């Protein structure tokens, strides 16, 4: 299949990752799949308000993980969605002081997310399970136009502890995993079903990275 975007390190395909399977040739998986919570962003000023494809339940996530098998994987999730099978460890992304969105009737907002560790072969110095990668307050219009972007700095931290080789992200979204891999001089393969997000990711990759800003929500 012809790539939507390609450079000396990164290849991005437009399509359904169940059908476009080049990503299965990678060595480690770092991805932010649909959580299965039917999330719809209200942040129309900075991102899309359209539903996330495949987010009605965890079937899509679980299908992709079954295709990947028992190889090393880091997979984002949320406390109110079922965890995937075979989790060996759970990391917490501490977003900092921002309370996020969530249930506005509650006096607390989500300021963390879960990251599930599957498989083996991870490397690097042993550290705690809480990763503090602060989400910056919105101060410009540089946020990628996607409802749930992740900061490339966070993805760099995760990829740095993955085994050597090619990084896969079958749910590329706005491209943060691919941007982070490129910044670390690692090869990466991504697949994204939404062509508009493919365009955003390609533009970011051509510029190496766009600054990441947020207004209280980056789930």
Image (cartoon, rainbow, N blue to C red):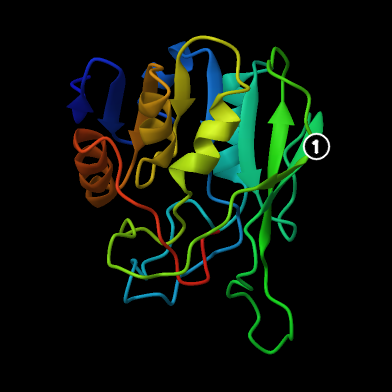
Q: Position of residue 138 (x, y in %)?
A: 40, 70
Q: Secondary structure at mark 1?
A: loop
Instruction: Name the spot of residue 156 as percent of width and height, x first.
Output: 51, 33
Residue 154, located in which quarter of the rendered image? top right
Provide the residue designation for mark 1: 128
Name the quadrant of the N terminus: top left
Q: Nearer the viewer, residue 62 or 183?
A: 183
In the image, residue 15 sits, relative to residue 122, either above or below, namely below
| Image x and y of residue 145, in percent | 31, 60
Residue shown at the point (45%, 11%) measured from the top left: 25
The answer to whether residue 16 is visible is no
Q: Is residue 23 above or below residue 79?
A: above
Write the residue at 47% across / 14% down: 26
Is residue 53 visible to us here?
yes
On the rendered image, what quadrant is the C terminus found in? bottom right
Q: Is residue 30 above or below residue 55?
A: above
């Amino acid at each position: 299949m012809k790539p939507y975007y390609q450079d000396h390190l990164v290849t991005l395909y437009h399509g359904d990752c169940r059908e476009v399977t080049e990503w299965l040739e990678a060595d480690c998986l770092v991805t932010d799949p649909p959580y299965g919570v039917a999330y719809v962003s209200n942040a129309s000023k900075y991102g899309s308000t359209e539903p996330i494809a495949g987010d009605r339940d965890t079937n899509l996530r679980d299908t992709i993980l079954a295709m990947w098998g028992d190889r090393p994987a880091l997979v984002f999730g949320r406390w109110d969605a079922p965890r995937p099978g075979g989790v060996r460890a759970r990391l917490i992304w501490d977003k900092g002081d921002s309370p996020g969105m969530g249930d506005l009737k509650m006096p607390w907002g989500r300021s963390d997310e879960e990251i599930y560790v599957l498989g083996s072969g991870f490397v690097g110095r042993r550290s705690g399970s809480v990763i503090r990668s602060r989400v910056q307050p919105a101060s410009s219009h540089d946020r990628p136009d996607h409802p749930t972007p992740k900061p490339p700095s966070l993805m760099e931290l995760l990829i740095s502890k993955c085994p050597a080789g090619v990084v896969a992200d079958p749910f590329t979204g706005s491209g943060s995993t691919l941007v982070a891999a490129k910044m670390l001089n690692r090869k990466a393969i991504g697949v994204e079903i939404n062509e508009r997000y493919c365009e955003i990711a390609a533009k970011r990759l051509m510029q190496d990275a766009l600054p990441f800003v947020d207004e209280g929500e980056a789930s």
